[in-house]
Image (spheres, helix red, strand yellow):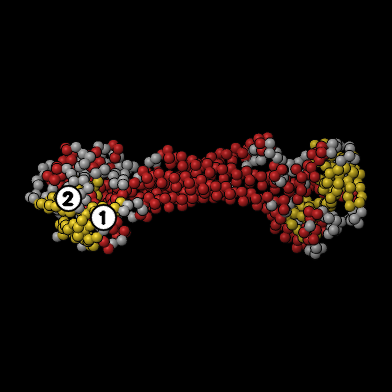
Amino acid sequence: MFLTKLAIKNLVRHRNRSIFTSIIIAMAILIYIFFDSLIGGMSELSYETIIDYESAHLQIVDKNYWEAKDELALDNLFTIDERVLEGVKNLTGILAGSRELNFSALLSNGIDNLPVMGKGIIPEEYLKVFALEKQFVEGDIFQPGDYKAVLGKRLAELLDLGVGDYITLLVKDNNNTFNTIDVEIAGLLHTSNPNVNQNIVYLPLDLAQQALSVGEQVSKILIRIENKDQASRLAEELGLNLIKANSNLAVYSWEELEAFSFLGAAVLEKQVILAIILVIAAIAIINTVILAALERLEEIGMMKAMGLQNREIVYTFVLESTGIGIIGGIIGIVLGIITIWFLSVYGMDFEALYGVDMASFGLPILGKIYAAWNPAAFIEVFVFGVLVSLLASILPAYWAADKDPVESIYHR
Amino acid sequence: MALLELKGVRKIYRQGQIEVPALRGVDLQVDEGEFTTVFGPSGSGKTTMLNMIGCLDKPSSGTIIFNGKELNELSKKDLAMIRRFNIGFIFQSYNLIPVLTAYENVEFAIRLINKYDNKEIRERVLKILAAVGLEGMENRRPHELSGGQKQRVAIARALVKEPKLVLADEPTANLDSKTSEEVLKVMVKMNKELGTTFIFSTHDPLVMDYARRMLEIRDGLIAEDRRREEINVSD
């Protein structure tokens, strides 16, 4: 108990040094919290952006189609009975469902061509699943049977197109025969999803099915649910129901989409930051303990003369360092809370600040990024900082405690 | 009764290839309650002998028996326990812990032996501080005390656990003669009242005036061992 008291008093002995070391640890913790919240914010935004404009919460597809879904082939499509679809839509927790036919196409304005992804949709269904309705910057959505299309404003700009202009989509139909679809641009979209803005052309489903010679078949049924955290459970439940109608069909939740693979990189990034914290905190603590030991040589010698064992002297140094870690951790957490509050309210516009477009990193984000609160990260990094402070001090403390008492007392 | 016995104790320091003998075969017996000074020129081996008696250093050869135990055979931990329970140290440079008050510096030593409850500890610490003339200064930190007062705290720290032996290395070296005398009187008083054995290493003639036994060390050997009648110390 007395040694604990001594360690606490030693903590304020070189106040400036203790504060300086604490601030180093605090800064390391703040950096982690900052990145964690930003990555959390990006993830949240990415989830919303992909779910709201591309993937929906659940996708019903043929299992074989899912294996090669990026090829946008017209194999392994399926038809679904209207009654089965209505049954799906009426399940508890499901808000809406929409059919979609995906295909690859070459978009032409008569002069230039660009490869795009075509989507045949039924507007009435589709706008209940995706948040596209309020994203029209010009024109509006088409109606079934119209020879019209909707595309992203960015894509339109690339080909110098506007509402009312005609475009041609060159496609390869189900019989491997080239076909063209000539449509008028009904509306232009601008969303927070760069993929929608520059790669996708929406057409009426019936028009696409006719041009691609696929009959009534679709690639996917996209489903919006009430709570995205329930996606896996609902996917399983729905899968069991659908297998009765078509054993080849499977239900996949948004979590299984490759578009979210960047989250793995984010986790790796956090681990790298943790490692940097480890090194920074360890160096600061080791430096502090060695300086303290050198200054207190006579004291260490006297303590040994009084009969203290090495482990008791180590305890005082380790406790002192742990105290510095706790102070640094608290400062770091407080600064973290202030920073995250600011960023969660005002956000951070990387494009405006640094001219960096997140889409160029493969992140489906446009505009400001808002920090996300993650209390678990605060606890984790605090405990981590304190533990590093504790562990880093053990070896230098042993070095100090193992000094020869005679040499220490007489400063030889 | 012998508290301490040194038999043929030698200590050789190595400085690179050169061997420097500090003690060349010391034989000595110190009884309980003795008030002894060890004097001699610088480098004669006084401090080396005190360090070995105090279990801080080990002899190159020879035997030291303290309180019936042969020190050569003991582990570092056992030696630390002997220091903790049986030996008090007073050094020339006081070696007080600057973040602790006078009271806490003394309390530290008695807490280590884990023998008394909080109330007893408080009573004993206050009593010893009063005995060394520091009543009312318990809450002062070392930087708020004079050299003499610091040395008194060091004495109180050495004595509070009532050790069998107190080793004092040049305890008056940094003190003026008046303060030295005051400090010495405190130690003589403790020697009488508690029966504590004191061994001093010193150059100071004043310390020798107070000693009942004087050991002169020259070139690592005890050159002279004189005893005299008890000194009367007035308050």
Residue shown at 36%/53% (left/top)?
A: A402
Residue type beneath disc 1: Ile
Q: Which mark is residue B12?
A: 1
How far is the residue under mark 1 from the one under mark 2?
15 Å
**Do tag 1 and tag 2 residues touch (Cβ < 8 Å)?**
no
SS class of the residue under badge 1?
A: strand
Which of A301/A55 is in front?
A301
Q: Position of residue A56 (x, y in %)?
A: 75, 50
Q: Is residue A166 left or right of residue A393?
A: right
Q: Position of residue B135 (x, y in %)?
A: 22, 41
Q: According to the image, label 2 marks what residue?
A: B218
Q: Position of residue B182 (x, y in %)?
A: 17, 41
Q: Is residue A380 above or below residue A370?
A: below
SS class of the residue under badge 2?
A: strand
Residue shown at 30%/42% (left/top)?
A: B101
Q: Chain of mark 2?
A: B
Q: Residue furthest top?
A: A352
Q: Residues within 10 Å of mark 2 (few under 14, many from 20)?
A: some
Badge 1 or badge 2: first in the primary sequence? 1
Q: Chain of mark 1?
A: B
Residue shown at 26%/52% (left/top)?
A: B20
